[in-house]
Amino acid sequence: MFRTNALNWHFKSLDHTMSKQYSPSEFADILIYFSSSIMNKESEMEIAWDVAKNCISKLGFVDCVIYFFDEKEKVLRQAAAYGHKNPKEYEILEPITISLGVGITGHVAQTLVAEIIDDTSTDYRYVVDDKERLSEITVPIFHHKALYGIIDCEHPRRGFFNQQDLQILSAIASICAIRIRSLRAESEIQEQKAKLMEAQVNLLELEVKALRSQMNPYFVYNAIGAIQSFIASDQRQKALAYISTLGKLIHYHLQYFEKDQVPLQAEVNMLNSYLELQKMRYSDKFEYQFNHKLCDDDFNRHIPGKVLPSLIENAVEKSMFDSLAHASLCIYLVCENCHLKVEVYCSQELEPASDLCFNYHHQIIPWEEQVDLLNQFKKLDIERSITILNEGVDKKGEINISVSLPVF
């Protein structure tokens, strides 16, 4: 049985060697078959195995290996094979990696010029893989000088491959390149869609977080508690002032919740309202200074929304959380070179066991992530820096935050 198979392979190879000239119609049929088969594949690996198999079954070759080019590492990796290198379905026997310029395969990958080697024993570039063979044909798979891979076929007979084989494999390689390019383009589109969807979800979450930074249940609960305390202690004027200021804050958030840009005047008013609420809530334990060097033209311009409210809320809540007796916040705004420069200085008396540097950085991380996402998806180019001026020496902490926002 083995002898019969060996003889059949021998005569098949001999027949291919003696009469492997295809008529125009046969040539066209081969290309149509390969084109139809390749263009229906849904992955690059499916393409590789399909080509390797059909080079044997349709072209009468005895060995075919498909390499894919690793752009990052600049090497060729065996992806599929048919013949001695393929003992089991979809398995390569001892797959090898070839660097650009190494061997006939590496040379063709480097030059992007297909080659036929009639006698590999006389070519110093020949690299033995699973066994020595005397003929080799190597064709690059590329598009617009972008290398995707290599089709490499070998045969034990000298001079086995001819120019018609080269034409067929070159056409197959072109079809492969078109399909691979299409698959990669489709993959990039899907990745971009996924990233865009993720970005939209992240931005929506940021908008909700920005709103909840002042309007979260704890803030509302504390606001109601402050009002009740004022009423219970017969401080009705303070209660009314608190309710009025809280109303302004709620109105601001409802008005600008869905806006990417907000008027600078409205943002300044909102910050004043928020700080005044916290001043009333914490009484003599919290004080603030809000200064600016802004003209009427500056107030009429717009800045990115949801950045400053979240920052100031983090600064106030963190300062009061760590504070033992007193905390203060100083804010300074100025417009320079189409940017709003914001300086925030926090000073606080610390609890004995607190770690200002670690705790504050942990608290500010969500705000920094918000800025990073806005920069990434809105292309806002917001700059910020956080400097720890005093890490709790003498039970005092000092932090400086600098922010630069584009002005529109």
Image (cartoon, rainbow, N blue to C red):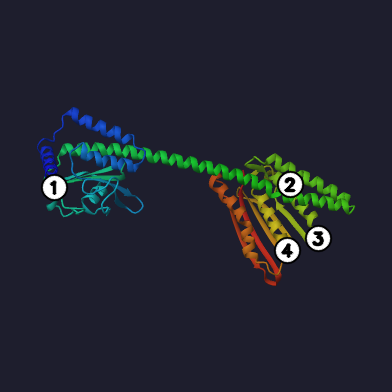
What residue is disc 3 on? 284
What residue is disc 2 on? 269
Type of amino acid under label 2: Asn
Residue sitting farthest toward the right = 234
Q: Label 3's element?
A: helix
Q: CA distance from mark 2 to mark 1?
A: 85 Å
Asked if the residues shown at circle 2 and circle 3 are in contact, with their CB atoms under 8 angstroms apart, the answer is no
Asked if the residues shown at circle 2 and circle 1 are in contact, with their CB atoms under 8 angstroms apart, the answer is no
Q: Earlier in the sequence, mark 3 or mark 1?
A: 1
Type of amino acid under label 1: Pro
Q: Earlier in the sequence, mark 2 or mark 4?
A: 2
What residue is disc 1 on? 156
Q: Earlier in the sequence, mark 4 or mark 1?
A: 1
Q: CA distance from mark 4 to mark 1?
A: 84 Å
Of the pair 239 and 134, the residue shown nearer to us: 134
Return the x and y of residue 298 as percentages of the image width and height. 67, 45
Q: Which residue is found at the position 17% from the left and 36% from the top?
A: 164
Q: Which residue is found at the position 49% from the left and 42% from the top?
A: 194
Mark in front: 2 vs 1:
1
Type of amino acid under label 3: Asp
Return the x and y of residue 249 as percentages of the image width and height. 74, 45
Type of amino acid under label 4: Ser
What residue is disc 4 on? 323
Q: Quadrant of residue 355?
A: bottom right
Return the x and y of residue 11 as percentages of the image width and height. 10, 40
Mark in front: 4 vs 1:
1
Q: Label 1's element?
A: loop
Q: Residues within 10 Å of mark 2 (few under 14, many from 20)?
A: some
Mark in front: 3 vs 1:
1
Mark in front: 2 vs 3:
3
Q: Residues within 10 Å of mark 3 (few under 14, many from 20)?
A: few
Q: CA distance from mark 2 to mark 4?
A: 26 Å
